């Protein structure tokens, strides 16, 4: 095959690939989509959807006349309205779809015009949210371009909303109230230790107000309030964990000062009692590290609990350290660590002398008998 023939073959192949890609892509674009009400939905609630589609099929026509534009909704008693706007006609033209109310479709012939036309379709959908036994996702609207064989082309548009039941809202309210009680308990504990909880109090108040609003709202709206409550509670738990970790770090700083009294001022670093204090301090420090890791991972309750465990260990260790310091400073207990080797040596010498005396006396006695 000559170079020119090969070049022509490659060009034709590229054009064929591009043509296939164009045919596989959707010819419509959703330029606007508005669903009322916004957010989660409740069973029996009225829903209105307004949308605008524009068309720009890459070819001679705005839309392939052998394709169809398929619509779908899971709303009850859906009512559709489609109006076509194009340059050649100044007023809107009503399009009558085919198919069932829940799955209407528009034939490509109704959307296929010379490519230089500016074509758009403005549609509305009205329907009612069906009854559900538990919270689930609902297809409000789906728009898909189908090829002549009934296969979907790429570029589908899907809009879903959660349908929330009254029972699920009641369960969620109870869960958020438990979370709020736990946050209150954290605040009370910290206030008892003199920790500033003003920022946490603000989050508590915000969450309580959201839960109160959820009690009287429709399920869909209530779920939105409860989401806000959860967010405020999470913020409060994060602040609580941060405050508790900071408090324990200060305690460990005070404990370190006490331990340095033994290891530096009194040179008791080898004293078993001091070594035990150091081990307990290290254990509390490890718990603080675990609390910080949980905090960074967004596990705020776990972080607070770990910090509380560290506080308990640090409190016990500091009490023991202060008691030992009081004994050392009062002279009730000597500085065993500093003189341990001397004491052991003295005891050994005394034992050797005693043994020598015993041996000497026995030898003298045998000499007298002999």
Image: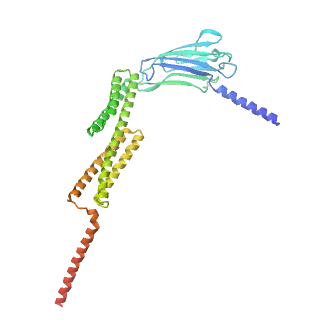
Q: Is residue 256 above or below residue 12?
A: below
- Residue positioned most to the top: 91
Residue in the image at 81% along x and 34% along y: 4
The front one of 333 and 21 is: 333
Q: Is residue 35 above or below residue 238?
A: above
Please give left or right for residue 263 compared with residue 77 in the image. Answer: left
The front one of 291 and 134 is: 291
| Quadrant of image for the C terminus | bottom left
Which image quarter: residue 183?
Answer: top left
Residue in the image at 34% along x and 21% along y: 216
Give the image location of residue 51, x and y in percent.
54, 18
Give the image location of residue 231, x and y in percent.
39, 31
Residue in the image at 29% along x and 68% along y: 341
Give the image location of residue 215, x and y in percent.
34, 23
| Quadrant of image for the N terminus | top right
Give the image location of residue 3, x and y in percent.
81, 36
Q: Is residue 363 above or below residue 51?
A: below
Residue 176 seen in the figure: no
- Residue positioned most to the bottom: 370
């Amino acid at each position: 095959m000559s170079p020119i023939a090969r070049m022509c073959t490659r060009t034709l192949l590229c054009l064929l690939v591009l043509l296939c890609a164009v045919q596989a892509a959707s010819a419509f674009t959703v330029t606007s989509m508005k669903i009322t009400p916004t957010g989660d939905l409740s069973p029996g609630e009225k829903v209105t959807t307004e949308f605008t589609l524009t068309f720009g099929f890459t070819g001679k026509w705005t839309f392939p006349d052998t394709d169809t534009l398929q619509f779908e909704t899971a709303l009850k008693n859906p009512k559709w309205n489609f109006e076509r706007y194009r340059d050649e006609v100044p007023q809107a033209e009503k399009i009558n779809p085919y198919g069932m109310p829940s799955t209407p479709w528009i034939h490509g012939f109704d959307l296929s015009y010379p490519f230089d036309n500016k074509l758009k379709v403005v549609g509305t959908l009205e329907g009612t949210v069906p009854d559900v036994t538990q919270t689930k996702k609902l297809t409000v609207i789906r728009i898909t371009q189908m090829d002549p064989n009934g296969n979907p082309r790429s570029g589908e548009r899907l809009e879903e909303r959660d349908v929330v039941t009254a029972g699920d809202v009641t369960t969620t309210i109870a869960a958020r109230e438990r979370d709020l009680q736990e946050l209150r308990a954290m605040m009370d504990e910290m206030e008892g230790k003199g920790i500033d909880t003003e920022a946490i109090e603000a989050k508590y108040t915000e969450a309580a107000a959201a839960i109160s609003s959820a009690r009287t709202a429709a399920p869909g709206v209530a779920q939105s309030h409860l989401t806000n409550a959860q967010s405020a509670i999470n913020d409060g738990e994060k602040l609580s964990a941060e405050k508790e970790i900071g408090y324990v770090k200060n305690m460990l700083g005070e404990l370190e000062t006490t331990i340095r009294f033994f290891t530096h001022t009194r040179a008791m670093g080898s004293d078993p009692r001091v070594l035990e204090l150091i081990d307990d301090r290290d254990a509390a420090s490890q718990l603080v590290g675990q609390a910080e890791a949980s905090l960074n991972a967004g596990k705020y309750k776990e972080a607070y609990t770990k910090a509380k465990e560290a506080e308990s260990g640090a409190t016990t260790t500091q009490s023991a350290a202060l008691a030992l310091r009081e004994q050392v400073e009062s002279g009730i207990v000597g500085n065993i660590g500093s003189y341990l080797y001397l004491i052991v040596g003295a005891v050994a010498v005394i034992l050797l002398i005693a043994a020598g005396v015993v041996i000497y006396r026995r030898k003298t006695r045998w000499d007298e008998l002999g």
